[in-house]
Amino acid sequence: MPVSRKSALAILLCGLLWATAAQAQRAKPQGFPDAPGKEVLVGKCFQCHAPTMWQDHRQDRRGWEGVLYRMVGRGALWTEDEIRAMADYLAAAYGRQAAASK
Amino acid sequence: MRELVARYLSRSISRRGFLKGLTTAGISLASAESILESLVPIAHAQGTRGIPPEAIKMVEGTGAECFAEQLIASGVKYVFGNSASEDAQFYEALVDRPQLKYILTPHEGPGAAMAAGYVKASGEPTIVMQAAVVGLVNAMGQMFNAFKEQTPLVFYSYRTDQTRRAGRDGFEEVANQEQIVQPMTKYSWLARRADMIPETVRRAFKAAWTPPHGPTYASWHSDLNDEKAYAEIIVQEKVDPRMRVRPNPAEVERAAKLLVEAKMPLLIAGDEIYTAKASAKAVKLAELLGMPVTQARQIYANFPETHPLWVGSPPAARITSLDFPKNPDVVLNVGNKLQHNSPAPVVPREAKFIDMRIDSWSMGNVMNTEVPLVADVAYGLDDLTAAVEGLITPASRKKFQERAQEVRRFSEKAKALRALVAKNPEWDRSPMLSDRVTSEVARFADKDAIIVHEAGSVVLHGFEFNPAGGRELFFYYGAHLGSGVGTAAGVKLARPNQQVICLVGDGSFVFGPTALWNMARLELPVITVVYNNHAYGGPHSRVIEKTAGGKMVQRRQFVHDYLGSPDMNMAQIAKGFGVDGEIAESPEQLKGALARARNATVEGRPYLIDAQVARVGVAWADKPWIPPIRIARERARKV
């Protein structure tokens, strides 16, 4: 399908806007309340995973802890304190109870 | 007629032209062919006046015999093939040529994977044969892998049509067969006459084995295998350009200066280091500069993971995802193709990039390159190391030593953090975590074991690969599934004195288990461990990431990922191919199974462990939903 110059420019601008929006979302993801553990989660996890993927995954603290340790097996380098903080945060924000109340 | 003979002998007309000339002059075709046959030895004698050098011999026989002779002269020991009736004369030729060993593979895909494994582990040439286009298309998945992985593997299949009756839509005939493979081969060619078969085969081996390596394809009409020919057979080394290239000295000086002046350089190791056997040279350069080392996705482990300058692989395939170093100002890539799967380059634009590879074709395609070093990386590392040594001052040496200490501190910390994987609260669960299976196998494997890895969603840890006499890795890069078992069989064929362990996912395994039969028949004692979660784990997670919050996730209805109900029993599949095996559901059962696997391999028998692995991750139900396709309701007759 031929693309006119105008259309090409529009596509380019859309792409740039999308990229900017994506960067903004990555910098300040929606649906992640400010609480201890958020900073390390955003810094460590969001370079590989989209925030929406986390929102689809609701489980208790032990479940989240298991997920985080599995990520260690995939190359993530975290201290036990960091894992603890992230598991606490995720259990509060995306635990089974949190899921039921939303 | 005299003039026609003279023109034919002077090669100013072809055989066909000669025949046409005679028949036009009123001679019957049968008589003309008889005359032509009588002239063939004279024509050849004219073409090879003088005494042929030792490396060249003239062979008279069927085209298939000439083919076999050239394979021997090209250094081929094993031929991998699947049964093909039009190769009858080739099989006949093997009877008196026991040095050419034919390995019958029950499917062309795993057969080609086995051949590729053999090439990678031995560094020796081989050929894969298929029956016409129907066999070729089965092998093409592994041809794709060989192309992506730059494996020098030669493929051959005949065309079922014959030289004088092509284009009639005959049995197994397709037009332009040799063109089908062009996008994924370095070279494809159709021999036009029987006496051109050896030349075509030589060229295929030459192209495959001239860096950058890659697969090639040779083909010819099936009747040429049966036709009599008189042809030159030439040993491969007489046509091999032996391309070993030293880098441009001016570029070497520029690269050395950048590295010496860098605040924090980073070395990315790649497969050309392994194939050039240059791991020790990469270590030497890294140690000289106190330079951290990483590796983006490749087939082999190219740098010792036990070395204090090893900082691990980037988890997100871009070096910005490394924990250390965070902002390298100079990045030296040695022999890594740098697979780009996203718009973001593997190395950020801000870093000065030095690219040392023999694969000049792909250099600069994505990366902006400050210093290109087109070279055999063994020579390139030698020259670069010498140039760096020439620039070192006492002050810079002190800087490098301090940097090495900084890298060492990170490396030790990272090693301790990686060990935390075993603190998973689900560590002892059954069915097992894939990490637990990996950990148990890593603990079990010999110190110089070869790990063939086609468990796509599993990231290995704990093996501490070391190409300098330690454990070796044979991963995959092309991702046409079903390569693991075949590759492991080929690796064991090439390295019978090393333990070979094949790690494969259940999804990958069922694409290509037939090489188990080769393991049983050839007594190749490979241990195969199937990570069996009865699912396509990778596609499950990636699809959810692409459709986050969508209907599939909300309703837990995934059509594309669940392989259970009924569950596949890989141990039973193995038994069907003559390989003993068992199911392991818990870590304790796995330990016992591994011990039995060792006993089997010590006795020369392959063994398979069907390790039951938990489905973990987003939105997996205990009993996954299955699309409601109920054919039973449509059955009106009990047949």
Image (cartoon, coloured by chain):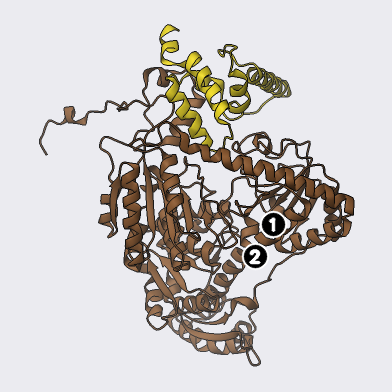
Chain colours: A yellow, B brown
The structure residue drawn at horizontal position 67% and vertical position 34%, both measured from the top left corner, is B344
**In the depicted structure, whether residue B357 falls above or below residue B623:** below
Quarter of the figure with residue A31: top right
Q: Quadrant of the N terminus of chain B?
A: bottom right
Three-letter residue code for mark 1: Val
Front in this rendered view, residue B273 or A68: A68
User: For the C terminus of chain B, which image quadrant?
Assistant: top left
Quarter-of-image position of residue B535: top left
Q: Label 1, on which residue?
A: B283
Residue picked out by circle 2: B210
Discs 1 and 2 lie in a common subunit:
yes
**Of the pair B350 and B27, the residue shown nearer to us:** B350
Taking B598 as reference, is B117 left or right?
right
Q: Is residue A79 left or right of residue B584?
A: right
> Where residue B355 sits: x, y (%)?
74, 50
Q: Residues within 10 Å of mark 1 (few under 14, many from 20)?
A: some
Residue B478: % across, % down: 53, 48
